[in-house]
Image (tube, grey):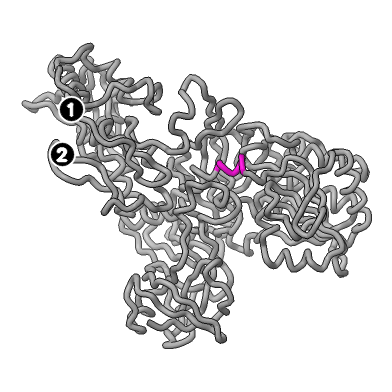
């Protein structure tokens, strides 16, 4: 246990652990030290803004409170009790506001701006400055996602510190010196990265704003709905900002064990898919090779019933892993109990032994050794996990990237908790889908019958991602009839005979399970333009004598006894806890590093993060979509005399394409990676030549 020290702040005595930051020490005493640049998640304090000036007994000058740590016997006075500190803070704010524009009524930060708040609480009531304020061209497009108003910037360096020390992309920098210092991108290139949108939340003024949210709403017109992102298996906690029934932005909702308040750009900006041009708002029936016609709901339910009765137990269901636990369970209950249709193509489950010893993702930061056993880049599969890995590396962890000898994709870390001298391991499985394990559990809980070994006459495709999967399309092509459940017409053209409207994770209530095994609540942020999936599944259930509630809370209570230890829907809460660890330790997957061949590299075709139906329907994200690159290890590149950025020829079985070579430190020897869309007709083993 840390040593406790006694600190006196504004005549209040408080005991804290030695070394605790002074901002946190003051907060423990119920006293605010105002800050702009200070943000613990960005690393050590830099004292750039000087808003936190305090008087420390024994020191002749005012000190930046954010750079101080608690030491026994310290006596500190803030602006509350020290005229000297108050004068310092007034002067700091006056200096910050010298060139800051008075455009609060039109600034997107107005009403939720720290500079506004602290100026009212600590700043002078008037100004002595009568000269014109400095102006810049505005807005400057940092990227299609982010706009920069330079005259509002107070040079707190939160954004550049995030770019340098958290995302580690180095693309956002401060250029020039002294009063001419400004924020810019490296060589004025667009800020292209998986996490760029975080700087819009970090900015304590209206300098960096989201182009999607710009001039869209004011703080008194909006509601923030706490929910969970449904676009990758991390399950980041978010708040969906809504106005007049529309989602206007996505903000982080810091869960320190899951995401630490960071979001990837897909989760932050891809909500635009809710208003896609091809959004399905009514049931559809095939009316031509690639054309649909609208159906009324009663007629659609009749058609679905007829198709299900014709398919019977030879019905095959494919699920995408994007469904809520309740949706997957309701669909499984209808098909398994109503039809005896037990055949399904499920998202990947959890390999035996990998889910027995759970720890929060935050444990990665404290690990000393981490092995990444994944064919695909972690950042493309579970982006925020990449930030935890970078935090671990900065703390001194050794991270190795080895090719597994099986299809297991996982992280193996040493456990920071050492019990009885036993060195334990944590294993994190990295699913391909947001709720793959929840969907698999729900399907199993709905029935235990064995599938009939016959050619499926009817295929039910749940989710747009499944409808776009080439393997699913091959299966569907052999069926007599195909029913789709999804959001977008384009996903089902040429494959489905009947399509029922689906909803987004932002339009439903339910639960989801992330890669840790953490059960979390998704809350409806806006009403969907169509009835909830549970509502029409409930009506179909009546026709087959299967009781399915249209309410997610009731469906969850039914499945909870079998899968979640009987926890009630209301107990999940906004800060979902991690289920307890099992009694046994998992046996970690083994990894082997094969000999380096001069020719014949194993091809891994991966799906980039910035792909899929939601990204395709978000215009601002198109510049983020990677294309034209091949990733290979430094050893393989050196053996073939290939330089980073060089154009190379990739060939296999008579097929050859040209791509840019990218040296990847997270790739084992003997393996190359290419995005699925770029891989084309290439086969499992390729040759790469300069």
Tell me which numbered mark, 1 or 2, is placed earlier along the sequence. Answer: 1
Inter-mark Cα distance, 1 to 2: 38 Å
Residue at position x 52%, y 63% from top?
Answer: 410
Residue 90, by quadrant, is top left
Q: Is residue 141 left or right of residue 342?
A: left
- The numbered dot on residue 122 is none
Residue 521 colored in magenta in the image? no
- Give the magenta-colored segment's residue range: 271-276
How far from the left and from the top, in percent, is residue 387? 41, 52
Q: What secondary structure is found at the residue carrying circle 1?
A: loop
504 over 11 or under it: above or below: below
Residue placed under numbered mark 1 in the picture: 74
Residue 44, by quadrant, is top left
Q: Main secondary structure of the magenta part?
A: helix
**Is residue 21 something one can see in this rendering?**
no
Q: Is residue 326 left or right of residue 605?
A: right
Q: Is residue 566 left or right of residue 606?
A: right
Residue 272 colored in magenta in the image? yes
Residue at position x 38%, y 24% from top?
Answer: 106
- Of all residues, the one furthest to the top in this rendering is 125
Residue placed under numbered mark 2 in the picture: 180
Residue at position x 29%, y 16% from top?
Answer: 121
Q: Nearer the viewer, mark 1 or mark 2?
A: 2
Q: Nearer the viewer, residue 295 or 197?
A: 295
**Is residue 32 something one can see in this rendering?**
yes
How far from the left and from the top, in percent, is residue 197? 41, 43
How far from the left and from the top, in percent, is residue 417? 43, 53
């Amino acid at each position: 246990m840390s040593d406790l020290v006694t600190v006196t702040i504004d005549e209040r005595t408080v005991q804290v652990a030695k070394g605790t930051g002074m901002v946190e020490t003051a907060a423990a005493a119920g006293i605010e030290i105002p800050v702009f640049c200070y943000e613990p998640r960005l690393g050590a304090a830099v004292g750039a803004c000087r808003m936190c000036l305090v008087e420390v007994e024994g020191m002749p000058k005012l000190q930046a409170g954010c750079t101080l740590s608690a030491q026994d016997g310290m006596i500190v006075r803030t602006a509350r009790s020290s005229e000297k500190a108050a004068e310092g803070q007034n002067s700091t704010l006056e200096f910050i506001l010298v060139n800051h524009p008075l455009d609060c009524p039109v600034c997107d930060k107005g009403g939720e701006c720290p500079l506004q708040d602290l100026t009212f609480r600590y700043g002078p009531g008037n100004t002595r400055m009568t000269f014109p304020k400095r102006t810049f061209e505005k807005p400057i497009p940092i990227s299609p996602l982010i706009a920069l108003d330079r005259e509002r910037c107070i040079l707190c360096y939160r954004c550049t510190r995030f770019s340098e020390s958290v995302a580690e992309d180095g693309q956002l920098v401060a250029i020039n010196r002294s009063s001419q210092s400004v924020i810019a991108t490296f060589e004025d290139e667009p800020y292209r990265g998986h996490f760029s949108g975080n700087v819009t939340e970090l900015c304590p003024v209206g300098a960096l704003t989201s182009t999607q949210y710009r001039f869209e709403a004011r703080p008194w017109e909006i509601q923030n709905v706490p929910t969970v992102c449904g676009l990758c298996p991390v399950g980041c906690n978010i708040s969906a900002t809504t106005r007049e029934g529309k989602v206007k932005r996505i903000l982080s909702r810091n869960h320190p064990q899951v995401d630490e308040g960071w979001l990837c750009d897909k989760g932050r900006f891809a909500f635009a898919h809710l208003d896609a041009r091809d959004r399905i708002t009514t049931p559809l029936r095939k009316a031509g090779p690639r054309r649909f016609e609208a159906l009324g709901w009663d007629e659609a339910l009749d058609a679905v019933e007829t198709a299900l009765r014709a398919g019977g137990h030879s019905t095959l269901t494919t699920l995408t892993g994007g469904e809520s636990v309740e949706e997957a369970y309701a669909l499984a209950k209808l098909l398994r109990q109503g039809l005896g249709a037990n055949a399904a193509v499920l998202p990947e489950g959890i390999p035996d032994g990998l889910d027995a010893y759970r720890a929060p993702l935050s444990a990665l930061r404290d690990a000393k050794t981490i092995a990444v056993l994944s064919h695909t880049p972690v950042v493309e599969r579970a982006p925020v996990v990449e930030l935890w890995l970078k935090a671990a590396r900065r703390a001194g962890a050794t991270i190795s990237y080895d090719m597994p000898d099986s299809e297991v994709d996982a992280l193996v870390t040493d456990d920071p908790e050492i019990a009885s001298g036993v060195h334990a391991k944590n294993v994190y499985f990295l699913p391909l889908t947001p709720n793959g394990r929840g969907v698999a559990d729900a399907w199993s809980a709905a029935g235990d019958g064995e599938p009939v070994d016959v050619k499926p006459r009817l295929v039910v495709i749940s989710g747009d991602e499944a409808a776009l999967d080439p393997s699913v399309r091959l299966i569907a092509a052999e069926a007599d009839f195909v029913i789709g459940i999804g959001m977008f017409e384009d996903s089902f053209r040429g494959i489905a005979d009947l399509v029922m409207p689906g909803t987004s994770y932002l339009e439903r209530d339910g639960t989801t399970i992330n890669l840790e095994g953490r059960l979390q609540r998704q809350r409806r942020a806006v009403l969907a333009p169509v009835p909830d999936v549970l509502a029409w599944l409930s009506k179909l259930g009546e026709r087959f004598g299967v009781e399915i509630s249209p309410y997610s809370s009731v469906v969850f209570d039914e499945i909870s006894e079998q899968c979640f230890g009987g926890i009630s829907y209301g107990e999940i809460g906004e800060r979902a806890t991690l289920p307890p660890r099992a009694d046994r330790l998992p046996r970690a997957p083994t990894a082997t590093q094969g000999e380096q061949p001069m020719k014949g590299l194993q091809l891994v075709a991966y799906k980039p993060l910035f792909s899929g139906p939601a990204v395709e329907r978000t215009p601002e994200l198109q510049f983020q979509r990677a294309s034209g690159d091949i990733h290979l290890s430094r050893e393989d590149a050196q053996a073939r005399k290939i330089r980073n950025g060089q154009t190379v020829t990739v060939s296999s079985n008579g097929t050859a394409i040209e791509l840019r070579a990218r040296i990847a430190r997270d790739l084992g020897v003997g393996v190359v990676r290419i995005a699925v869309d770029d891989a084309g007709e290439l086969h499992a083993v390729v040759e790469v030549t300069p």
